[in-house]
Amino acid sequence: MARNLLYAQSGGVTAVINASACGVIETARRHPDAFARVFAAEEGILGVLRESLLDLSQESASEIAALRHTPGGAFGSCRADLGDPQHQRAQYDRVLAVLRAHDIGTFVYNGGGGSMLTAANLARYARSMGEPLTVIGVPKTIDNDLPHTDTSPGFGSAAKYIVTSVREAALDLASMSGSSTKVFITEVMGRHAGWLAAVAGLAFSSDDSPLLILLPEIRFDRNAFVTALKRVVERHGYAVVVVAEGLLCEDQSFCAQAAVSEIFGHEQLGGMAPQLAQLTRALGLKTHWAVSDYFQRSARHLASRVDVEQAYACGAAAVRYAMEGMTDVMVAIERTSDEPYLWTLKPVALDSVADVELSVPADYIRADGFGITEAARRYLLPLIQGEDIPPFRHGLPVFAELARVRVPPRLPGWRE
């Protein structure tokens, strides 16, 4: 008999995570013989623990389709993972109890490395308990740091936003640099991997540009940076600096935690832009700075069509893998050609991607550490191709409006 499918979102959301949700839901709905009903957990794994489930059979086909062009996490996400099964058995027992109570035979978890670890642990624990549970992971992260996949859905769109913003801001800066601002600094996400900073290199077609990129993979050398900055300003009249929030100092501590920011008044990761601005102003250079923050991961109006297509395809493939009897795998993207960019999907073991971070490789980083190589351009450029503009009404984008019908709980409440 057909059992039910549960989908959940985890970690920082993206402009296209709901496209993956759309792929899961639409594909499962086309196979009622395999999946009686489709549920979604509110706020990821926390929703499973709390037995806070949504009945997606109550959602119209048009609103589910609208998820494809809706940013954010339609069902809520969380910054929480299940603990070690050896020490947190109660969590796993509770998850299995909830799944059992609602006859859920397939769990699809959409997230990054930490989420894949939770999925892998749950799959392993269910098997040890003799529970017939299929667990499939769907990749998601703007950080692009998941291994064994060409890219992670969410990255291409965030990258397109960053490259476009840098390119536009550079023209603005060039216009005013003669008598006003000389340096513009923008801070992007990337705690341990510098993919989002690296992609800014696509904003200019050659190395002879006003751009300097600061990556977590390269330890920050203040003197080297000052020298490079002066050289760029002297040559071009201005400089654009893109810095990853996770920039590391020589002692391998986060630079944003190495000193108290006068702007924020306390140590805080994510304060690199104001710290660099303080340094450049001390050189007598008028400086402006900005932090991309949520804009870079929510800018659905500027999504990469390739990214949207891959996000949807990964969601749909997760359902197909479950129907084919696979479990304990994540859907991965495999590049088969650079030009034209061609890709396919393949399953990879959850254990091989669980809690593993992929850094920007050394051959993608320019010798001076402040830019990217041609190899990086060949890899990155295909990921930002195409536009997938959402529908607009009255000058504003139209997003999904879900009914969010809750499934009546069947178990006692969970004490966190």
Image: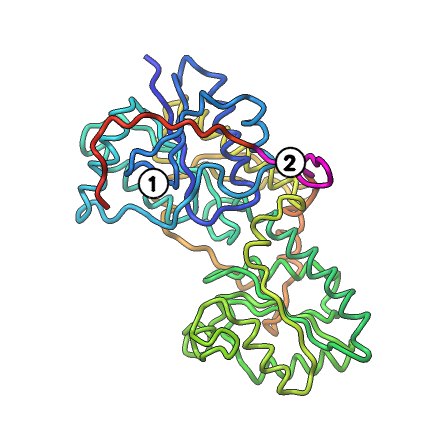
Query: Which of the two labelled residues, at mark 1 and mark 2, occupies the earlier sequence position?
Result: 1
Looking at the image, is mark 1 or mark 2 nearer the viewer? 2
Residue 76: % across, % down: 44, 41
Q: Are marks 1 and 2 in contact (CB under 8 Å)?
A: no
Q: Is residue 212 something that shows in the picture?
A: no
Give residue 203's position: percent from left, percent from top: 71, 59
Mark 1: few/some/many CA within 10 Å (<14, 14-19, 20+): many
Query: Label 2: how many residues lie within 10 Å, few (<14), some (14-19) or many (20+)?
Result: some
The residue that mark 2 highlights is 398
408 vs 131, nearest the viewer? 408
Q: In the shown orientation, is residue 136 left or right of residue 274?
A: left
Position of residue 107 relative to residue 161, above or below, is above
SS class, disc 2: loop
Report the side of 333 relative to 326 (left or right). Answer: right
252 left or right of 46 in image: right
Instruction: Establish if 400 lies above or below 152.
Output: above
User: Which amino acid does the dot numbered 1 rest on?
Assistant: Ile
The residue lying at 52 percent from left, 45 percent from top is: 152
Q: Quadrant of the N terminus?
A: top left
Q: What segment is highlighted magenta in the picture?
A: 389-400
Q: Position of residue 302 (x, y in %)?
A: 67, 46
Q: What amino acid is at disc 2?
A: Val
Query: Vertically, is 41 above or below 247?
Result: above
What residue is shown with label 1?
45
